[in-house]
Image (cartoon, coloured by chain):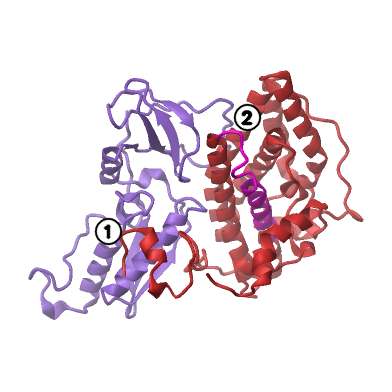
Chain colours: A red, B purple
């Protein structure tokens, strides 16, 4: 039956316990989408790649959600919630695509709530905690500048789902990048204190930046197949955009060595920072305590 | 100036209106159950599903209804998501399925990801309804493809006040209460209002 209000709908007996709030409990976001793997592409590779990009969005979204009720102004809280929601939507499509591509049939929730730290493939930039609002803005600037360059190239992917994620994501992440860039300029041009905060934020994330442009074997094969965006090829656009933003208030990009991984491995191989365990505990503990539970 | 452009999305024949099956003698009983009348009924139901977050708009007004077709005994309704994470679409899909089932139609709702939705697809009727509800409808969306320009200051938009009609409202926040909106304030009458972002 149709309902007059969303509240009426979620309290309906006929709901059979599948939803607990507005917009929840719905089916696969790829319901009815053709998820055939493109010719000449290994399903396992495509799945691994979708997890990388999906995990970037999922983990960054979770960190942004931690700012809710802590942001300095209501407008910034709304902005951060909107950005988190856009990224969560991108994560849902990508994680669902991963389960369809490798033939495992695993759903978005299986991936989000059922994987151990070593199986989560986000870049480490997405997982680190923000010391303050300046730190968040610096991290969001770098993350969204990099992701926008990546999504723009995905628009030409031979995989129709990745191409659609790219096409939709470009307009969303362009908005995120503008938000972070405008706050970077404002903080740098504000007081001595606000300038020191954005400078400290940039210094904190500079060591995590080289990892964004490293190429894994999975990406190398998928770039050759016309499915993935080449991370190494994003560097030029990234440097140009960051350079433009920093030059506006005469900020300098910190000269810092890359954060080491383990035997050359980092986030894309499931090697994370200490912060990741705490983040996953918060994200997964309810789902792990009550496997298969519905509300 | 508020744009009235609103190009129709591909695949949607909004002018195709059919009578409700079994209603007011316009749909003869003997056609009951035929593919044509089932599709017409399904289309009419689909077009009328409201957006829970912008309840003055329907699926048809938003331009997200892409196709209504038959697959054997089932009716297949195809819709395109707006924003990646918009929870309203999930509610609309669900509402759509329930309404079709209530009308005795075995229905399937499919997601069409490409081409991606544009606010240009909001119909002229949808734009009028938004403005009447005090929400400024979107300006024309930027051209797609190619490099994305960086904006170091808020993008100037010539948004007209939906209440007094004065041009040149000022943006108070780039993000609003839903993914699709930004906040503005009229410089003439002082009224704060929401603007549906062009995308």
Q: Residue at x 43, y 50 (%)?
A: B117
Same chain assignment for discs 2 and 1:
no
Say which quarter of the image contains residue A216.
Answer: bottom right
Chain of the residue where label 1 is placed in the rendered structure: B
Q: Residue at x 37, y 21 (%)?
A: B187
Q: Tell me the tag on residue A181.
A: none
B132 vs B27, left or right, is right
Q: Nearer the viewer, residue B171 or A98?
A: B171
Pointer 2 with pointer 1, Cβ within 8 A: no
Q: Is residue A72 magenta?
A: yes
Residue A159 visible to an observer of this rendering: no
Magenta stretch in the rendered image: A51-73
- Per the image, label 1 sits on a secondary structure element best described as loop
Could you classify mark 2 by the number of other residues whose Cα lies within 10 Å: few (under 14), some (14-19), or many (20 or more)?
many
Please state, as top left, top right, bottom left or bottom right, where the C terminus of chain B lies in the image: top left
- Residue A108 vs A81, above or below: the answer is below
Q: Residue at x 65, y 66 (%)?
A: A286
Q: Is residue B82 above or below residue B41?
A: above
Q: Which residue is mark 2?
A: A183
On the image, the x and y values in percent for residue B41 come to: 23, 68
- Residue B165: percent from left, percent from top: 28, 27
Q: Which residue is mark 1?
A: B48
For label 2, the SS is helix
Asked whether B102 falls inside the magenta stretch, the response is no
């Amino acid at each position: 039956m149709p309902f007059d209000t969303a509240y009426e709908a979620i309290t309906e007996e006929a709901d059979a316990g599948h939803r607990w709030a507005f917009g929840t409990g719905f089916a696969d976001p790829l319901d009815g989408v053709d998820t055939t793997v493109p010719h000449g592409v290994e399903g396992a590779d495509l799945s691994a790649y979708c997890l990388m990009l999906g995990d970037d969005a999922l983990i960054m979204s979770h960190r942004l959600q931690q700012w809710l009720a802590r942001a300095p102004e209501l407008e910034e809280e709304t902005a951060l919630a909107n950005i988190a929601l856009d990224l969560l939507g991108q994560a849902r499509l990508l994680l669902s695509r991963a389960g369809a591509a490798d033939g495992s049939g695993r759903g978005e929730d299986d991936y989000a709530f059922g994987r151990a730290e070593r199986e989560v493939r986000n870049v480490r930039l997405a997982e680190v905690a923000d010391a303050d609002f300046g730190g968040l803005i610096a991290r969001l600037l770098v993350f969204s500048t990099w992701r926008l360059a990546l999504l723009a190239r995905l628009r030409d992917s031979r995989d129709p789902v990745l191409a659609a994620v790219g096409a939709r994501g470009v307009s969303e992440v362009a908005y995120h990048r503008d938000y972070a860039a405008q706050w970077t300029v404002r903080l740098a041009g504000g007081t001595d204190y606000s300038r020191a905060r954005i400078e400290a934020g940039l210094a904190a994330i500079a060591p995590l930046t080289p990892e964004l442009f490293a190429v894994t074997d999975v990406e190398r094969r998928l770039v050759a197949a016309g499915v993935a965006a080449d991370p190494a090829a994003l560097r030029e656009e990234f440097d140009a955009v960051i350079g433009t933003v920093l030059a506006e208030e005469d900020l300098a990009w910190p000269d810092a060595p890359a954060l080491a991984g383990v035997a050359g491995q980092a986030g894309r191989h499931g090697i994370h920072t200490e912060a990741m365990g705490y983040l996953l505990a918060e994200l997964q503990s309810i789902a792990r305590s009550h496997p298969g539970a519905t509300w | 100036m508020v744009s009235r452009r609103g190009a129709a999305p591909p695949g949607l024949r909004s002018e195709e209106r059919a009578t409700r099956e079994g209603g007011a003698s316009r749909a003869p009983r003997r056609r009951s159950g035929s593919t044509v009348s089932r599709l017409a009924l399904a289309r009419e139901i689909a077009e009328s599903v409201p957006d829970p977050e912008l309840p003055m708009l329907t699926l048809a007004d938003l331009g997200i209804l892409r196709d209504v077709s038959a697959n054997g005994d089932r009716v297949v309704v195809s819709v395109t998501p707006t924003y990646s994470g918009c929870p309203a679409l999930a509610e609309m899909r669900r509402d759509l399925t329930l309404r079709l089932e209530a009308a005795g139609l075995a229905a399937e709702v499919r997601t069409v990801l490409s081409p991606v939705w544009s606010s240009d697809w909001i119909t002229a009727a949808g734009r009028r309804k938004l403005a009447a509800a005090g929400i400024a409808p979107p300006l024309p969306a930027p051209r797609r493809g190619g490099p994305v320009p960086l904006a170091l200051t808020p993008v100037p938009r010539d948004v007209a006040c939906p209440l007094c009609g004065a041009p040149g409202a000022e943006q108070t926040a780039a993000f609003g209460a839903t993914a699709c909106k930004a906040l503005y304030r009229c410089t003439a009458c002082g009224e704060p209002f929401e603007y549906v972002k062009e995308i």
